[in-house]
Image (cartoon, coloured by chain):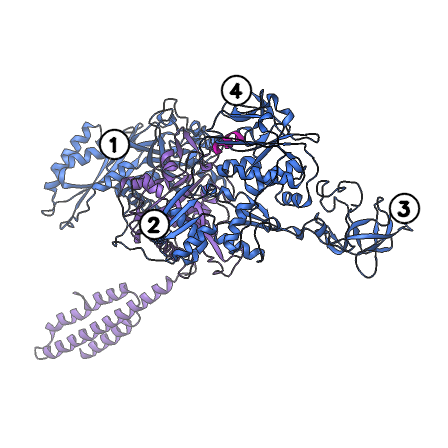
Amino acid sequence: MKEKLEALREKALGELATLETPKELEEFRVRLLGKKGEVTELLRGMGALPAEDRPKMGQLINQLRGELETALSEREQSVTALLKEKRLKEETLDVTLPGTKTKEGGLHPLNIVLNDLIDIFQSMGFDVVDGPEVETEHYCFEALNVPKDHPARDMQDTFYLAENLLLRTQTSAAQARTMEQRKPPIRIICPGRVFRADEVDATHSPVFHQVEGLVVDKGITLCDLKGVLEQFAHEIYGPETEVKFRPSFFPFTEPSVEVDVTCSECGGKGCRVCKGTGWIEILGAGMVHPRVLAGCGIDPEEYTGFAFGIGLDRLTTTRYKISDIRLLFENDQRFLEQF
Amino acid sequence: MKISLNWLKRYVDISVPVEELCDKMILSGFEVESIEDLSATMSNVVAARILKLEKHPDADKLQICQMDVGGAEPIQIITGAQNVFEGALVPAALHDSHLPNGMHIKRGKLRGLPSDGMLCSGEELCLKEADYPGAEVYGILILNEDVPAGTDMREILHLNDIVIDFKITANRPDCQSVLGVAREIAVALKQEFHAPKPTYTTVGGDINDYINITVKDYDLCPRYMGRIVRNLRIKPSPDWMKDCLRTAGMRPINNIVDITNFVMLETGQPMHAFDLRDIRGNQIIVRTATDGENITTLDGKEHTLTPDMLVIADGEAPSCVAGIMGGLNSEIKEDTTDLLFECAKFRRDSVRRTARTLGMRTESSARFEKGVDIGGVGYAMDRALQLIQELDAGDIVDGVLDRHEELPAPRTLKVTTESINALLGVDVPEATMADILNRLEIPTTLENGLLTCTVPSFRDDIEGRADLAEEVMRVYGYDHIVSTPMTGSIVRGKILPERRNTNLLKEVLIAQSMQEISTYSFISGKALDTLSLAEEDPRRQVVTLLNPLGEEYSVMRSQLITSMLTVLATNYNRKNAAVRFFEVSKLFRPLSLPLTEQPEEIPALSLGLYGKDEDFFTLKGIVETLLTNFGVNAEYARSEEPYLHPGRQAAVTVGETVIGTFGEVHPDTAAKYDLDARVYVAELRLQPLFEAIEKVRVLYKPLPRFPAVERDLALLCDEEMPVAEIQKTITKAGGKLLETVTLFDVYQGAQIAAGKKSVAFSLYFRSAEGTLSDTDIDPVLKKIFARLEEKGCTLRS
């Protein structure tokens, strides 16, 4: 009997070492250790033994069972590990193959830049307002101190829709509307679409976009204007950017200034972009004309203010170095997806 | 305004380099458009004397000239010209010289003999008869100068000058003149300004014996002044005057015409001279034209006038279009003996409109359009008369006719220095302020911090504190402006709900792979025809531009579809395989036509897509996702847009309102855009979305604690039956236990009877109270089946 057990042990352990799949292992388990397995059968067969041999024999069989169970479990572990290793090896990918992409959507470049501007000015406490694109002569011109005989009111520059109605030529038209509706302190920007009778070419478009800014409060000075525009320039062109004022003329501001910033291309040393001057003209601005304030019911003796107008299209074409403004309105997918 | 440096130097000492001058002027408000060095047009060309002339041994037409060019030894130049002679003084281009016509002359050989340069014709030096007598003669230019050989031709031709083109802003019409700019230069350079002080003597007589002047319309002609000059001695102007005119781009003609042009350029006040014998009835009448009246202007063109145009007429007919151009009949001629000088102010918009209508823009009209100084009329007239005397061009008759209503009194402004500094935010010393204003010829006194300024009539633009502040600052220097942070309460700026919601809308669309586009707000009037819209379609009510750039851009758009189709077509024709576009813009809807008030501007969205993975349902999916995000409960039903596929389009209804339509574009419309692919478009009005989202309050719902029970239903129904209706029926009958109904199959084919379709749904039942059993669900299903049967749907076995 003992020899029989020994032979079974030898045979079983030998066989176990050759098994390589979970299925074979399971069959092995059932065959030897299952309810009707060989080892179980041995236990059952103990009844035929003399009573005094039984404990000893039972002990030996259970020992064998325990031994086989341990060996099986070890074998199972190593088979699982091997299989896993094999699977992982088989699943190796060429990681240089391209990824699966979801097609991206995006904003029009003009609105990407506009959102940046809104962010900058909103954080400085400017409310964002909107105005109509079809304006009356009053808000587009008269309220802005552009008298009837001013050349800007010519049909040649302005698209008219009726006697008194036109497509606004400047977002400044929102100034008077705002000042009539709100009392100082006023701190607004008005982004929007504007229209001028310019033939289409690489740098001109009859439809373009501006962001008008307006501040009215007690004690607002030209230096405050510079402070705000410097902040804006630092955000847009970089913290090293310097801002310079040059005298200019707009009917709705007095004093009026052209605002230059140091050329971001050469840092002010002079290059092709800035035509060697080191400066780039970015916008027009000035102190709100007292007549404009008074026309909106704001006492120019008590309040002062400044206004500025940023050309969004030019800001966009300069930022992305877009050579032709027409690209912005042509909407070729290959252009739009670059931003 | 192009002004020569030499001319400016007649009134102000300019000793700084021209670049420095320009930099200073830019900083005081006068942009410089260009700096042109006239001497740069030619180099190394000198006056040379022909010492000896011989025939070329090997060429009949060539002559060998020994030339004195001012050096120790003569040089040899070979010429083909026949009009040269020994002793003649001619322009010689020496070795390595440049000519204004672009030629570069080098030493060379002509038929074997060396030639050290080239003799020049007037044409080669780009000269006209008016520039130099004999310049247009065929052959070499023979100089009639008494200068030593070797003199630089630039000196002889007065080319040692620099012309600066200043950009004059619209508020400074006074600087449309050499004197105006010179005054500014004097201030910028801190130099004295010497304006001419006109004096002259008259020969007696009385102007009233020669002419009578009547102004009929003081609104269009606030001032008109006339003077008579007799016994004219018409001849060429002196060189200095010709040079001045040439640098300003004007051609010298004769002393009288040149004086009027010179005075205009110098003072900014246009002048006109009439031949007195051609003024019929000794009458000058300033009046508007009668309808259909004609005039032939100096340039020989005939114009028909309209009653809104101002003319200077004699007793019979117009002699001059006021402020723009004189008539041919009364121009100054070689044999004119007596003249009438006109010096006037005409209303600027009147001149502008007339000049544009007649298609004539002259130096004179340009100045009237910008505005001339009503107080400067007399000065310009006196200056012209002074020049008449100086040039010995005629005899000045006594008396002046000066027609005007009451002239505006000089404006006096009282402004504190403190209030100027308060506006600027800097501390300009008060004495500096007064000094700057006085140097600008705005007489100013300073007393206890109060500036009292007498504004001269030529500075009509100065009305108050802000204007004075600007004058002070631009001279004091804008580099004194420092940056200060704005003070006030710290608030984050607010943004209007519509803009905030538009941003959300764009986010939702971008998340669905959509790219934003931007197109013009005006479109072709014919664009609507591509959509085959019915005549009575409200979108045909469009706002039309009175002066469009062309038909292509002539109406404000009442829909966004045509712009979208144009962009889709551009992309398709450029072989972009697949696109998904959206545009957020405004629709313009007139409240009445013809337009009397601002049209309604309606925010709208258009979607457009094509590509192999796109179909009606990808577009619908985008629309649905968008509406769901905005909390909009929309219904979809067949629609009848003429530009969409009749079987593949739907209207989106919210409540009772149709907010838009979408679908596959009708092949007929697509063909009009050269699109031979299936393309899909949508247009939605955005206001309902913006209103809906304002009501959305997102509240957490507890996650289900009990499992759902799924039942699949396969139904058979007529093929026309809309799936949405079946789904609605199921949902309604399902009651509160029915959690979701999801369509998972629609089938028509072999196993289904003709005219029928199979529709399959998954139904999920769930209760918050406990796990559902068949006994809970069966009655519900029974009810659902009953309702479906009423709709003609049967269960597929």
Residue on which disc 3 sits: B60
Q: Which is more foreground, mark 3 or mark 2?
A: 3
User: Looking at the image, which is closer to me, B130 or B767?
Assistant: B130
Is residue A226 rendered magenta in the image? no
Give the structural element (helix, strand or loop) at label 2: helix
Image-quadrant location for residue B284: top right
Residue on which disc 1 sits: B716
Note the chain letter of the purple one: A
Q: Which mark is residue B789?
A: none
Give the distance between the C-alpha atoms of the residues marked 2 and 1, in whole angstroms. 57 Å
Give the distance between the C-alpha atoms of the residues marked 3 and 4, in whole angstroms. 67 Å
Give the structural element (helix, strand or loop) at label 4: loop
Is residue B352 in view from this perspective?
yes
Give the structural element (helix, strand or loop) at label 3: loop
In the rendered image, which quarter contains the C terminus of chain B? top left
Above-or-below relation of B381 to A110: above
Residue on which disc 4 sits: B291
Above-or-below relation of A152 to B57: above
Give the distance between the C-alpha atoms of the residues marked 2 and 4, in whole angstroms. 55 Å
Q: Which mark is residue A118?
A: 2
